[in-house]
Image (cartoon, rainbow, N blue to C red):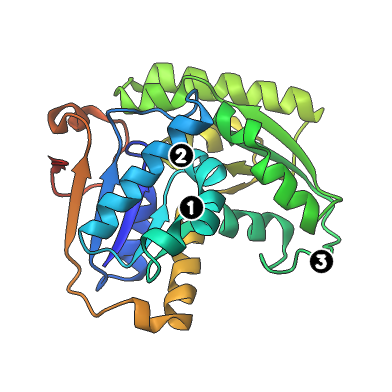
Amino acid sequence: MIGLFDSGSGGLTILAAIRSAMPDMDILYLGDHANAPYGHRSNAQILDWTQSGVSALFDRGASVVILACNTAAAIALRTLQQSWLANAYPDRRVLGVLVPMVEAVTGQPWHAENTRSDHDDTVILFATAKTIQSRAYRDEVAKRAPGVRLIEQACPGLVDAIEGGAGARPLKGLVEGYVAEALDKAGGPAPSAVLGCTHFPLVEPMFRAALPAPTQLYGQPELVARALVDYRRRHASRFAAGTGTLRLLTTGDPEALKTVAGLPGGLPPFERLV
């Protein structure tokens, strides 16, 4: 069984893509809705809550956990992998969602830090303020494709609006405002744009409509699912045969989650984590 951890509901976009790519996989999802959103939290809080969430998933049988939250991955993943996992759960693995996106933007595999791509595009990154402050995307892209000009656009309030079930008009207004700011920073249309938050695919059509038509828009769900299929092929022993069961857990109020904007269909109800 694999586990997915997110600060809220955005990781359900990753879950939907994984289920489509690997319908036999048993999945346990945990959204930390009680503490969401993470975008304005301290690094110490994010690390603590992420570690607790990963532990809860491991303790319930997950062999691999994906941090389906860019902010959690940017702030906590390296520490969990390098300083915590070997002592707490030496036979388990934690993966993040940044890697497949960085590979797509730079055209370089993750392990190729010492080689350089000749990519020289301008790429707009839409993300939470905390993800941008972490410099995770900026530093990893620069290692592999120093010619890429990364325009970073924080989107404060957008995750809150999505989680709070805001209607189409206020969501559209927020997205259009952030796209306009980013295009102004870029000095005009950019060849590529990145949705660097797993909540943002829930309003991807609004981003697509606001961006110039030629802009290639990268979303994480399909990229992460494709990367996980490859990881499973290379580490088959970590993935026991499943039956496609799915369970959703939350640290918050399950009833309140029925209003989250744009959730994938066909999901079971959330259960409160106990």
111 shown above or below 182? below
* Label 3, residues with CA under 10 Å away: few <14, some 14-19, many ≥20: few
Task: Compute the Cα span from label 2 to label 3.
Answer: 29 Å
**Looking at the image, can residue 199 be seen?**
no
Residue at coordinates 24% horizontally, 80% vertically from top-left? 241
Element at label 1: helix
Q: Residue furthest front?
A: 87
Which label was assigned to residue 47? Answer: 2
**Residue closest to the eye, 197 or 82:** 82
Q: Is residue 257 left or right of residue 119?
A: left
Element at label 2: helix
79 shown above or below 195? below
Q: Is residue 95 left or right of residue 131?
A: left
User: Do the numbered discs 1 and 2 sit on residues whose CB atoms are within 8 Å?
Assistant: yes
**Residue closest to the eye, 172 or 45:** 45
Name the residue beneath numbered marker 1. Answer: 80
Name the residue beneath numbered marker 3. Answer: 114
Disc on the earlier residue, 2 or 3: 2
